[in-house]
Amino acid sequence: MKNWLIHIVVNAIAIIAVGALFDSVIIDGVGGALLAGLILSILNAIVRPVLVILTLPITILSLGLFLFIINAITLWLTDAFLGSTFEIDGFGMTIIAAIIISLINLVLNSLIKDMKK
């Protein structure tokens, strides 16, 4: 449970960072970012594995690059669930935001893992 809460906070930090980088990503405060992080974590736990299995041939043919599209789809679904609390203009921007959120998550999770040792 504790790791899941840390993952939600890391997602929220990444979402806030993307919102600060791009004008076309609109977040309604820290509470909106935490809510978006929660929804994104739930979607990554439930929807993402199903999408990965369904798109496995495309993912293999693209050498794994299609996973960025799957991340963008989960981010787009988060946008759809939250309405005006969290908005991203256009699917192209969603792909860019998903890539940056993935990179920030990678860095922050590795830092947290190093701190636990």
Image (cartoon, rainbow, N blue to C red):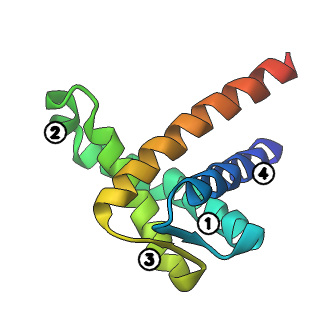
Q: Which residue is mark 1?
A: 36
Disc 2, SS:
helix
The residue at which mark 3 appears reads as 80
User: What crowding class fits label 3: few (fewer than 14 Cα within 10 Å), some (14-19), or many (20 or more)?
Assistant: some
Question: Could you give the CA–CA distance between mark 1 and mark 3, rounded to whole angstroms?
Answer: 11 Å
Which residue corresponds to the image point at 27% horizontal and 34% vertical from the top-left? 65
| Mark found first going from the N terminus, 1 or 3 | 1
- Mark in the foreground, 2 or 3: 3
User: In percent of the image, x 16 and y 36: which residue is there?
Assistant: 57
Marker disc for residue 27: none
How many numbered marks appear?
Answer: 4
- Image side of residue 38 versus residue 69, left or right: right
The residue under the point 55% across, 53% down is 21
Task: Identify which amino acid the numbered label 2 is placed on.
Answer: Ile
Q: Secondary structure at mark 3?
A: helix
Name the amino acid type tagged 3: Ala
Up-down relation of residue 117 to residue 86 (above or below): above
Give the quadrant of residue 117. top right
Residue 5's label in the rendered image is 4
Q: Which residue is mark 2?
A: 58
